[in-house]
Amino acid sequence: MKDFRDRREMVERSRSAVWRVPIALIVATLGAGALGYLGVQLFLLPETLAESRVHRVPDLTGESIEDAMEDGRSAGYEVVASARQYSDRVDRGDVIYQIPPPGSYLAAGDTLFVLVSLGDQETRIPDLMGLDLEAARAILRQLDVDVTGVRRAPSELVPQNLVVSSEPPSGTLVEEDTAIVLTLSRGGAMVDMPDVRGLSQAAARDTLEIFGLTVGEVTSVGADTVGTASAQVVVTGQEPGPGHRIATGSAVRLQLGLEEEVAVRRQGAPAAGQGAEAPVDVSAEETPENERIRARDPAPEPPADEMPADDVPVPDPQSPEDETF
């Protein structure tokens, strides 16, 4: 009886061992499959791991900035135009590039930055306000733009002789044979009086008009000389003088004369024939000094009783007593 029970236990143990092996294999296979699936989910397919939070970034390149913003909002993102640049391959206003690039994974609600095209690079007239004439000419020369004229206009904002505006205005597209007219400032209500000495009357008038001034009274010095055909008549004097502050619209008095008088007047010396006396050759008895000596120390008069009868002064009865001869 005991032998029968021992044999039965051996048979049961052998059967349990046979079933344990397949069960262990099944468990190991299931475990490996589960671990592999989790690995794939973690490293190869992240969109299935957090599909509700992370999405693929849409491709916005080539779209207009308006359409890109609309498509970005539909995908759950905010689209911002971070910069613009010229491009000869992408039309003006369309998206050139985006960050993150298309197909990337980005959390919903984040921002997509796009680069927008300005189209083909164009040359436009720059803003020249506040530059002097030479600097403005140099800039325009580099753009192959010719300055065909210069105007003057009063300005309370821009100092005198600096560019106020241009025609065509800044921002205008530069095309072939584009020409420009610059407007310079005359200054505000007051301007510095220019020096017009040495200029002809017509040139002086034009210069004063540039500064918003007019020609007032005109006088001539040495009319007989100025009237000769060979004389070069220019402005020899002006009032107010150069450098004085004067209100725009004021009249300036001019004095005309010969050209050679200008340098003399600028040095402060009298011009020839203007206050200079020619030397006179006189004898010692006729010099002014001897006349002053004789006037200061007159010769004593002889006594009345010794005077000749013809030399005695006779008072005029019809003249007042205080009148002298």
Image: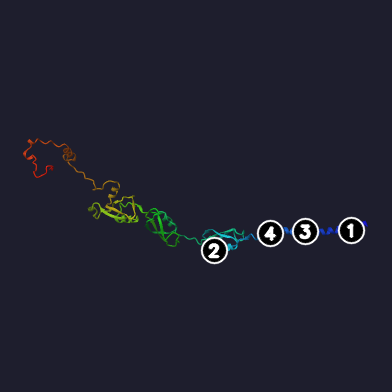
Residue highlighted by disc 1 = 8
Q: Position of residue 280 (x, y in %)?
A: 19, 43
Amino acid at the residue labelled 1? Arg
Does label 1 or label 4 sit earlier along the sequence? 1
* Residue lying at 53% horizontally and 60% vertically, measured from the top left: 116
Residue highlighted by disc 2 = 66
Mark 4 Cα-neighbour bin, 10 Å: few <14, some 14–19, many ≥20: some
Q: Quadrant of the C terminus?
A: top left
Q: Quadrant of the N terminus?
A: bottom right
Amino acid at the residue labelled 2? Glu
Does label 4 or label 3 sit earlier along the sequence? 3
Mark 3 Cα-neighbour bin, 10 Å: few <14, some 14–19, many ≥20: few
Separation (CA) of disc 2 from disc 4: 36 Å
Is residue 32 shown to the viewer in this render?
yes
Identify whether 120 is placed above or below 310: below
Q: Nearer the viewer, residue 252 or 318?
A: 318
- The numbered dot on residue 41 is 4
Amino acid at the residue labelled 4? Gln
Separation (CA) of disc 3 from disc 1: 29 Å
Which SS class for mark 3? helix
Cβ–Cβ under 8 Å for marks 1 and 4: no
Residue highlighted by disc 3 = 27
Q: Position of residue 45 (x, y in %)?
A: 67, 60
Separation (CA) of disc 1 from disc 4: 50 Å
* Residue lying at 91% horizontally and 57% vertically, measured from the top left: 5
